[in-house]
Structure formats: C-alpha cells, structure tokens
C-alpha cells in the first residue's frame, strides 16, 4: 500500500471498520472527548495534545504511514447506515507491535463509545478485524490484554475465541499506577475466515 492507497475498509452487517484520513480529525476527537473517562480508565496516560484536532490530523496521517510500513494498523468503527466520509466514530480498534518472521503476531486494542455498548458492535467489528489480520495480513497470533476487573472486555474476547494464557503483574502504567493484566491470545484458525460465530 502507498500513502495514496485507498483506506482499508471492512464491512460487516451493521458497521464499517476503516482507516480514516486526516480530515476526519474532528470526528475522532469528538469520540475520544465524549469518552474521556470511559476509555481513559483502561488507557495509558495520553500526550498533553491528545484532545486537539491538530494532534489527530497528524496522528491519522502517521497511522496510514505506520500501516504502509507494517508497524501497526489503526481502525475506526462507524455505523454502516451513513457514508464513511461523514459517519460518527463509535469505536477504535488497533493492531500494534506487528512482529513478522517466525512470530507473525500483533497486539490487539479496542474501545467503544459508551452509548453504543451492549449491542454486540465490538464483537462484530473485532470478528472482521481478526479475520482480516489472519487472512489479509498473514498474521498467526493476536494478543489482547485486559484489567482483571474488565469483565466486559473479557466477555468480548471469550466470544471471539481468545484463550487466557497468563496473568502479568504490574503490566501497564495507567493513571500513574502499575496495573496487573490478564493475557489472552487468538491463533489463526486452520482455514482463515472461519472464526466461530456468536
Ligand atoms: C470492552 C467494550 C468494548 C465492550 O463493549 P460491549 O458493548 O460489552 O461489547 P459488544 O459491543 O461486543 O457487545 C456485547 C454485549 O451486547 C449484547 N448484545 C446485544 N445485542 C447483541 C447482538 N446483536 N450481538 C451480540 N451481542 C449483543 C451482548 O449480550 C453483550 O452484553 P453482555 O456483556 O451484557 O452480555 C466496552 O466496554 C469498552 O469500550 N470499554 C472501555 C474500553 C475497554 O475496556 N477496552 C478494552 C481494553 S482491554
């Protein structure tokens, strides 16, 4: 993919899951601003400029470059009933620390707008992203980690077939405190595209 390539766009029954261009900065900022506490409670400390359109304009362009260099893939979840060029952002999904060679692994992260939880949107979006990671990107292993008390996140991962593999103490610095995390992973199915249904 070149920097001029069309954005990656995955389509599910109710959603678009897509890369966004720099001119979507205001929509991405609105999503993070509305969900400051909801997402902040599980996220590492953000840069001081995080809540500004200038930050997101640069960041969205950098994200496209990072995908082009096979470093990471950052996607946004949009309702499918509006065009991706104008739909509100209702979630984010990332595959970071892409490791090739004999590992073919990446770390999965995600969040959903607090007013859109409870409808299965994240499970639906992640199923498409995991399928793409295995069949489109050739990855073999996706790792996802969650706070022990984050039962909603644990349930999403369980529905997708992620298996708990361990417990890491002092794993991630959140709001100035080192927090333990449950470690889970999903490995590629024998035939990509055949991830289990709901
Ligand atoms: C983690 C998070 C994405 C989970 O959101 P969620 O809405 O519970 O997950 P889904 O969108 O997959 O929805 C599943 C829920 O919708 C319900 N649901 C309703 N209609 C559904 C449908 N058509 N299909 C599937 N599920 C449906 C499910 O029963 C489930 O509810 P339950 O957990 O009470 O049983 C959300 O809590 C969040 O953004 N948290 C903050 C950020 C975060 O924790 N990120 C992960 C860090 S590890």
Image: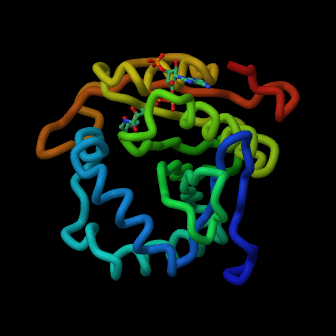
Describe the colour scheme in one phrase: rainbow
* Quadrant into which the C terminus falls: top right
Residue at position x 66%, y 71% from top? 68
Image vertical order of residue 145 relative to residue 62, above or below: above
- Residue 114, quarter of picture: top left
Q: Position of residue 99 (x, y in %)?
A: 60, 50
Which residue is at the front of the view, 140 or 41? 41
Q: Is residue 125 above or below residue 56?
A: above
User: Is 46 left, or right, of 165 in this rendering?
Assistant: left
Locate the N terminus by quadrant.
bottom right
Q: Residue furthest right?
A: 191
Which residue is at 23% across, 40% downward?
A: 41
Q: Is residue 54 left or right of residue 67?
A: left
Determine the residue positioned at 29% across, 54% down: 34
Q: Residue 159 versus residue 24: which sits nearer the camera? A: 24
Q: Position of residue 121 (x, y in %)?
A: 56, 36
**Drawn side of residue 4 relative to residue 57, left or right:** right
The foreground one among 34 and 65 is 34
- Residue 107: percent from left, percent from top: 52, 43
Q: On the rendered structure, is 81 left or right of 138?
A: left
Nearer to the camera, 153 or 82: 82
Residue 170 lies, in percent from the top left, at 23, 31
Residue shown at 51%/79% (left/top)? 22
């Amino acid at each position: 993919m070149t920097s001029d390539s069309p954005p990656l766009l995955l389509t599910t029954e109710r959603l678009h899951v897509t890369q966004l261009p720099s001119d979507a900065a205001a929509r991405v900022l609105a999503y993070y601003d509305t969900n400051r506490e909801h997402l902040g409670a599980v996220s590492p400390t953000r840069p001081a400029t995080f809540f500004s359109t200038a930050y997101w304009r640069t960041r969205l362009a950098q994200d496209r470059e990072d995908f082009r260099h096979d470093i990471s893939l950052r996607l946004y979840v949009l309702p499918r009933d509006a065009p991706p060029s104008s739909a509100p952002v209702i979630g984010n999904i990332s595959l970071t620390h892409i490791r090739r060679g004999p590992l073919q692994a990446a770390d999965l992260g995600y969040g959903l707008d607090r007013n859109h939880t409870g409808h299965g949107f994240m499970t639906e979006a992640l199923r498409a992203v995991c399928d793409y990671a295995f069949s489109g990107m050739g990855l073999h292993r996706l790792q996802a980690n969650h706070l022990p008390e984050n039962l909603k996140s644990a349930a999403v991962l369980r529905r997708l077939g992620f298996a708990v593999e361990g417990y890491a103490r002092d794993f991630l610095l959140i709001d100035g405190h080192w927090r333990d995390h449950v470690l889970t992973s999903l490995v590629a199915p024998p035939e990509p595209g055949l991830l289990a249904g709901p």
